[in-house]
Amino acid sequence: MDQIVNFLLSNPLWLAVAVVVSLVVVLLMLKKVFKLLLFAGALFILYIAYLYWTGGDVAGSVDVLDQFLRSWGERVLMFFKGLGFGGTEV
């Protein structure tokens, strides 16, 4: 691992290539996560529409989702605080 780091630090061109490749990989991963979130949101909207048309408990489902998102928001906030980043309450 030290050899790779030393090689990249001694060759600025290869370091630039490695940075660009890393950025492309990160952006592609973020794009996939965004698509997954859009898909999950669309499924939830379809589920709410199904509950509405069949007379189900729409408000209860929305409350459950709200609680789920708040708990995950708190977990993510605690994770970033553990890494040393500041943050505000959710």
Image (cartoon, rainbow, N blue to C red):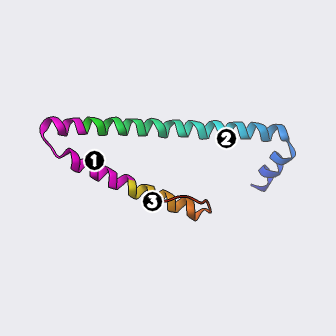
At mark 2, the secondary structure is helix
- The residue furthest bottom is 82
At mark 1, the secondary structure is helix
- Sequence-first disc among 2 and 1: 2
The residue to which callout 3 is attached is 74
Residue in the picture at 15% in, 43% down: 56
Residue 76 spot, x, y in % from top left: 49, 57
Residue type of the residue flagged with mark 2: Ser
Residue in the picture at 56% in, 62% down: 81
Q: Residues within 10 Å of mark 2 (few under 14, many from 20)?
A: few
Residue type of the residue flagged with mark 1: Val
In which quadrant of the rendered image does the N terminus lie? Answer: bottom right
The residue to which callout 2 is attached is 22
- The residue furthest right is 10
| Residue 25 location, quadrant | top right
Residue in the picture at 59% in, 60% down: 86
Q: Distance between the residues labelled 1 and 3?
A: 18 Å
Q: How crowded is mark 1: few (under 14 residues within 10 Å), some or many (20 or more)?
A: few
